[in-house]
Image: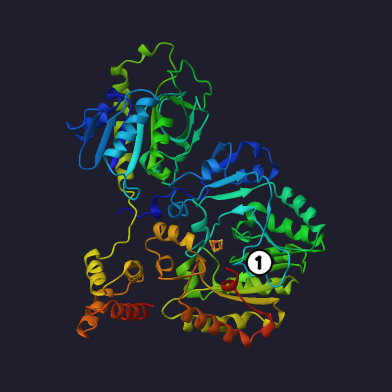
């Protein structure tokens, strides 16, 4: 699942439409739009909103660090228009820096490492660029900080598009203007989302049912259960057919064991066969 | 599923640099070699290295480089699981954290939360501290402890500087543990017999399976023999001895390779130790490396260290010991006696 955090509905609209996301009517604290692969939350502007939205999203949905991604996208102030990948986020109030882990090569999706920038999360709309090499917005530091309790840094991706170079009056940036900007970058964003949704890491799983049955048949104590789990995992990763071994123990009448003592003896036999 | 390796950034594509050492000569020289990488200024290396929930496993596919300043003490007393080879004042130092190689059993995977490589550029501060220590007593110092320093030599030049420092400090002996193929070091650096190059020797099948990106068995043996030829002191470490179904055959044929390249009488000594790892570290390894045969092996916890079942461990160590008896005199064979010290 790709969890997407976006500050304003007007920025999110082109993505919601392009992905065909449906409003989640069970959520009344925040606007949430989802499908079977995406879940987008509209946080509202500023660090407090962003932080609450991320916490809400991640407590409502169990984040899986092997398969899920958390994406924060939206507009920012910067020198040149473009879509940027963020490699450092500074909270302007606390001075604290956050670093997403940029392990994946997104160059074939329009985001080479030259598109990376440092970003400053400001507590008010910026009227100019204090450092012209940096980007300025109002949520990313809070998103990172709130998510870092649950989410691996390589599973957080910050994508920002430049809408302006800082403005004296926030009203100069109209919702229509932001929607138009976001629309420009939506095809590129969708490509990146597609790439990120494929970054799934393998997890070793063995037959849980067989494991439970074996524990019962060996009359396993807590310690033995632990040892049986270790043997099941080892058999799986070393490519050994544990199911066949167990069924031959059945044929020999050694399983199910008649007592805990007998169970221990059979467990030793299983271990010796596997090692 | 998408192939993981095809989608990673190139190694050291991101270089994090502590602001304090941005103008250090070594920082500048390292950065000049990576024109395609992104430089990211940081305040303290721990801001990047100690982030929660990092994936050591995935970071090994695209490690970042962190250039930092080592602060406080740089020299530490050796731990009980380390072989001290009879030296009273056994120390280690870490001018680099983490390694460019990728051994499946590496304890660094359990020790560090990050697979990124930290280079402490201020080696001169370690030298100053060591000079003070050397005024008190002779020192035996492992300098390639939480890394493989030779593997990073073209980046840091640390090995060269250590050999030079050792040559001019008579009561210092250093050990440089490695799995690298590099032998040019021995050609260009004047020798010093108090510099011990310790080669980890494993069967080729173990190297292929569990010691990724390291030199082949033959390359290690060729490099070790060049070191001997050039007057350096060499130790071979049959440690860790790793279990696989056909371990006995693998270690026997490895021994035949060893004697092809190395004359045992020219070695300082050899060490033998089967694989063991702190019980604390294995927990992290098992969760980070769910598909690793070494991590998921059902070890026994003895004295806080996860080890092969006693009988198997004895058999493995005895087998290697027996092979080595015809190769080097027994008083030069060190068995890692971590069980008593643990
Ligand atoms: S060479 Fe040594 S430090 Fe490097 S990965 Fe292998 S075991 Fe770890």
Identify which residue is drawn at 44% across, 43% down: A102
> In the image, ligand 1 is in what quadrant?
bottom right
Residue nearer the viewer, A16 or B74: B74
How far from the left and from the top, in percent, is residue B242? 49, 74
Residue B112 is left or right of residue A73, and the answer is: right
How far from the left and from the top, in percent, is residue B207? 50, 70
Q: Which residue is mark 1?
A: B183
How far from the left and from the top, in percent, is residue B6? 39, 53
Residue nearer the viewer, A183 or B131: B131
| The C terminus of chain B: image quadrant | bottom right
Residue nearer the viewer, B189 or A6: A6
Identify which residue is drawn at 24% across, 64% down: A208
Residue nearer the viewer, A60 or A95: A60
Residue A137 is left or right of residue B231, and the answer is: left
Identify which residue is drawn at 38% across, 14% down: A170
Badge 1: how crowded within 10 Å, few (<14), some, or many (20+)? some
Q: Is residue B160 above or below residue B118?
A: below
The image quadrant of residue B197 is: bottom right
Identify which residue is drawn at 71% across, 82% down: B265
Tag 1 secondary structure: loop
Residue A143 is left or right of residue A42, and the answer is: right
Residue B182 visible in image:
no
């Amino acid at each position: 699942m790709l969890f997407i955090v976006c500050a304003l509905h007007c920025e999110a609209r082109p993505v919601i439409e392009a992905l065909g996301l449906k409003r989640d009517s069970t959520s009344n604290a925040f606007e949430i739009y989802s499908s079977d692969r995406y879940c987008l939350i509209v946080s509202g502007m500023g660090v407090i909103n962003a932080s609450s939205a991320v916490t809400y999203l991640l407590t409502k949905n169990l984040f899986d660090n092997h398969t899920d991604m958390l994406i924060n996208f939206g507009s920012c102030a910067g020198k040149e228009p473009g879509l940027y990948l963020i490699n450092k986020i500074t909270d302007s109030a606390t001075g604290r820096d956050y670093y997403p882990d940029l392990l994946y090569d997104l160059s074939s999706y329009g985001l080479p490492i030259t598109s990376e920038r440092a970003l400053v999360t400001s507590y008010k709309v910026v009227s100019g660029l204090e450092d012209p090499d940096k980007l300025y917005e109002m949520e990313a530091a809070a998103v990172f900080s709130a998510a870092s309790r649950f989410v691996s840094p390589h599973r957080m991706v910050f994508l920002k598009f430049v809408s302006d170079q800082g403005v004296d009056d926030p009203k100069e940036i109209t919702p229509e203007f932001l929607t138009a900007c976001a629309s420009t970058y939506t095809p590129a964003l969708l490509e990146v989302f597609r790439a990120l949704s494929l970054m799934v890491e393998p997890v070793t799983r063995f037959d849980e049912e067989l494991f439970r049955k074996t524990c019962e048949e060996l009359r396993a104590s807590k310690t033995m259960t632990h040892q049986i789990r270790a043997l099941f995992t080892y058999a799986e990763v070393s490519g050994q057919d544990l199911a066949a071994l167990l069924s031959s123990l059945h044929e020999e009448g050694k399983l199910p064991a008649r007592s805990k003592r007998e169970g221990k003896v059979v467990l030793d036999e299983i271990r010796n066969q596997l090692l | 599923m998408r192939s993981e390796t095809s989608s990673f950034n190139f190694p050291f594509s991101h270089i994090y640099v502590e602001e304090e050492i941005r103008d250090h000569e070594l920082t500048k020289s390292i950065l000049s070699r990576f024109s395609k990488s992104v430089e990211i200024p940081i305040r303290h290396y721990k801001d990047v290295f100690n982030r929660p929930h990092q994936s050591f496993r995935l970071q090994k596919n695209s490690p970042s480089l962190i250039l930092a300043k080592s602060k406080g003490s740089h020299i530490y007393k050796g731990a009980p699981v380390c072989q001290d080879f009879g030296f009273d004042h056994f120390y280690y130092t870490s001018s680099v954290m983490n390694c460019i190689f990728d051994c499946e059993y590496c304890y660094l995977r359990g020790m560090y939360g990050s697979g990124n490589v930290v280079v402490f550029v201020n080696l001169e501060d370690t030298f100053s501290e060591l000079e003070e220590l050397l005024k008190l007593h002779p020192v035996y110092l492992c300098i390639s402890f939480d890394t493989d320093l030779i593997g990073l030599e073209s980046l840091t030049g640390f090995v060269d500087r250590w050999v030079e420092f050792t040559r001019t400090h008579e009561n210092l002996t250093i050990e440089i543990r490695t799995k690298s193929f590099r032998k040019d070091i021995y050609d260009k650096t004047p020798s010093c017999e108090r510099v011990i190059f310790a080669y980890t020797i494993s069967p080729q099948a173990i190297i292929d399976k569990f010691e990724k990106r390291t030199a082949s068995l033959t390359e290690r043996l060729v490099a070790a023999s060049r070191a001997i030829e050039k007057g350096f002191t060499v130790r071979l470490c049959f440690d860790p001895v790793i279990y696989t179904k056909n371990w006995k055959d693998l270690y026997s044929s490895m021994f035949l390779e060893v004697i092809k390249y190395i004359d045992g009488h020219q070695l300082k000594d050899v060490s033998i130790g089967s694989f063991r790892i702190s019980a604390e570290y294995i927990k992290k390894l098992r969760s980070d490396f769910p598909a690793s045969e070494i991590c998921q092996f059902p070890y026994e916890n003895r004295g806080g260290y996860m080890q092969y079942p006693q009988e198997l461990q004895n058999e493995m160590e005895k087998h290697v010991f027996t092979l080595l008896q015809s190769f080097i005199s027994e008083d030069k064979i060190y068995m890692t006696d971590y069980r008593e010290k643990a």
